[in-house]
Every structure is written in structure tokens, then in C-alpha cells.
Amino acid sequence: MNRRPVPLTASAAFVLAVLGPLPASAVPADVGREPTRATTHLDEARPPCAEPRRDKYSCLLRIRPASQARAAGTPVPSPPNRKTSWALSSTAPDIPVPDIPVPQAGYGPADIRNIYGLPLAPDTRQTIAVVVAGDAPSAETDLAVYREFWGLPPCTTENGCFTKIDQRGGNDLPMADPGWAVEAGMDVQAVSATCPSCKILLVEADSADFFDMPAAVDQAVAHGADIVSNSWGAAETGAFVSAGPTSFTHPGVPILAASGDSGFSYANFPASWSKVIAVGGTTVTRSTEGWEHFAWAGSGSGCSTWVDKPHWQHDENCSLRTTSDVSALADPQTGLAFYQTYGPSEFGLDPGWFVGGGTSLAAPLVAGMIALSGLASSMDDASGLYEHSQELLDVVTGTNGECGDDYLCTARPGYDAPTGTGTPRGPIGW
């Protein structure tokens, strides 16, 4: 099998915190103030990837050691209950899984279900595609560990639940890329956390450039995906935006994209495309009264300089398209516990459990919630989120930068750019 090289600059919008090793066994002048990058714990992490290039989608991967994650108070996951968790069979024995270390922090599937009020074990067979660059060699085996630990039904190539293809629909996979491999691992496990009965299609582009990534999105749709999740992006340029009318416009198939992790800044593409659902980020914490949601300080928001404002978007301070449309868990301080073996060693880390965040996490979570409704084919764009915003939880607290307290960087009642129309409180679909 020939494997094509992938530049190590390729990765995506997410943040990691290591939980422990395995045991020995551009913004227009509509707003009065220039945006500045939000100051968050993102800045305390060291980015392992090279600076982005204008012809490639951005790498926003950052890594935090376990000691920092625990000391900062990252939440501990709710324990798995293999009798009544997300397993499709309620008869699974409630016994420990041998040889799998316990994650010390991060949210698990039961937490995600509780945060968003999701049904326990819906029997949907929709296919969610995750698009990445480069091969993720351990994606399926790590997914097996994740699902076994949390009591989820197996999702494998053998049972037809998991499929991995190249951007042409075949098995001529590209060379592995450590950063993208971790992204892929988190994304497929995030899909599993929200929709354990969904099929997963992992599409691996030859590279992160502005030809290959759109081609992989097209292939995902051609291969039967009901929803496509893209945890990556780049500052808008003509080269990137030119792919919008083709690769990011697929009637009947929702295309989701992470809005970015730089706070109030420029609008990222493909999130800024009018037919794409732009997913921003939130911080989610437990309280005595339940769950509290805040705009995450890193959630990408901004005004497009290329894409016309769609007819269903009516905010006042961006003359063109505004991001985001909806939001979900993204803060790596309160992120998802996921399991990864390939890739961490390239950054001086041991394999095992991690906490993942960034809008890279929010996108596949929302994809899973759309799948749960069984109504993905009715969501050609984000218009339904605006028409039915009363069915979402309005996030009214938090900021992702400086813009004079304007809605472009500050959560408020109604629409705001960091969190969009709100965050889900149940499956998404109308």
C-alpha cells in the first residue's frame, strides 16, 4: 500500500491535556475596536505544530501535561454503568473492564448525555463522517478501548459500524500525521459519546491543503455520510472560499465546521460559508442546580470578509456572514476524556487518556446531536437553528475577547457570535 506524505503542519482546532500514561501492562471595521486574542489557559499550553500557511488549513493543536490539568481542576468523569449506560443492550454486565486505566479527568458519555438532555440509547443508524488530513493508524483500536470502557456497543470495521477511506473512497491511505491522528481519535470518540448507535466514516485527505480537504468532504458525501464534521479551518482567502459552492454545499447533508480557537478575531473558513453550520464553543461546569454554560474564551467568532450574509442571519454589526451559529462544549478545562495511543509520543507525551477541547470537540458533539434527531436531511444550512432558537439553551454569560462588550465577543440574551443561537438541550432537528 502506497502512503502519501502529509506535512506535519496539518492538524486542527483542538486542545489536549494528558491525564496519565498507560500502566506497564480578517475582521471588517463594523465594530469600533480591533479584536484581540482572548487570554485563556490556551496560552499556557505549548503548540506542537508549525505555523499555518496560506495554502493549508490551520493547525491549532495545543497540549497540556496531566499535572496542569489536574491542578487546574478539570472535572472527574461520571463512572461508567455498563448495565444502563449508552449500551444498546441493557443486559451488559456492570463489571470493571480489565487492563484499561481509569481516566482521572474529563467528561464521559454519561456526562455529555446529562449536559445536553440526550436520550439514553436511541437506535439511529445515521452515518457521521469525520474529515481529517493524514492517516490515523490507531483510530479504530483506540475507539474500541473508549467504547468498551464506557459500556458502549462495539463500532468496528467488522460489524460495519466503522469505515476508514482515503479522499478517493479507497484504501490508499496517506502517511500518518501525529497531530491529525489525535484530532481524529478525539472526534470519533466525541461522536460515540453523543450518538453511540451512529456509524462512523473517517475520511483521510492526502494533505491539509485547499485542494485535498474539500475533496475529502466531497468524498464523505459521495460515500453516504448523513452529516459531515470538520474540526479544522483557516483564515478566509479567495483560494479557500472558492471551494464553498461545491465542496461545502451539499443539499440534504449538514456540513459542520469548528469556528476556531482564537476568540474574537477573523472568521474562519469553512465555518464562514453560508451553507456550513459554524460551531462555537462553551465552558460547561457542574453546579448545585445542574449544569452552567458560558461562552468559552477561545471560541472563534468574527465577521466574514468574503461570504454574503445569509437571509436568515440578521445581526447588526457584520455586513457579511457572522460566525458562529450554535455552540457546544469546547473548553479544554472542562473537556472530553478520550483515549489515544498514536501521536502523543511525537510531543513527548505517553499514550493513554487525555482531555480534549477546542471547537474541534464542539463540532462532532453537535454532529451527533443532529444525528440523534433523525432529521439531518432537513438541515441544509444553519437556518433552522435561527428559526427554532427557542428550543436551544441561550448562553448569556462569558466573553471571548475585546470588542467594547458588543455581541461579537460577549454572550448576551439572543444571538451572539461566540455561542451563536445557543447550545443544544436535546437532539437537534426540525
Image (spheres, helix red, strand yellow):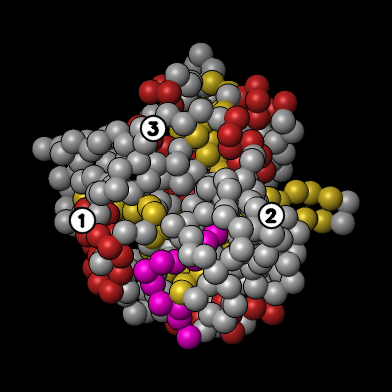
Front tag of 3 and 2: 2
How far apart in space, not on screen, are marks 1 and 2 (Cα)? 34 Å
Give the Cα distance between marks 3 and 2. Answer: 27 Å
The residue sitting at 44% across, 57% down in the picture is 26
Amino acid type, label 3:
Cys
Dot 3 or dot 2, earlier in sequence: 3
Label drawn at residue 44? none
For residue 178, side relative to residue 374 (left or right):
left
Seen at 43% across and 52% down, the residue is 231
Relative to 63, say whether 148 is above or below: below
For label 3, the residue is 49
Query: Which element is circle 3 on?
Result: loop
Q: Is residue 55 left or right of residue 150?
A: left
Quadrant housing the N terminus: top left
User: Which portion, as a residue range, is magenta?
Assistant: 301-311
Percent coordinates x, y for residue 365 in the rendering = 54, 57
User: Which mark, residue 399?
Assistant: 2
Placement of 270 over or under 339, stated as above or below: below
Q: Secondary structure at mark 1?
A: loop
The answer to which image quadrant residue 137 occupies is top left
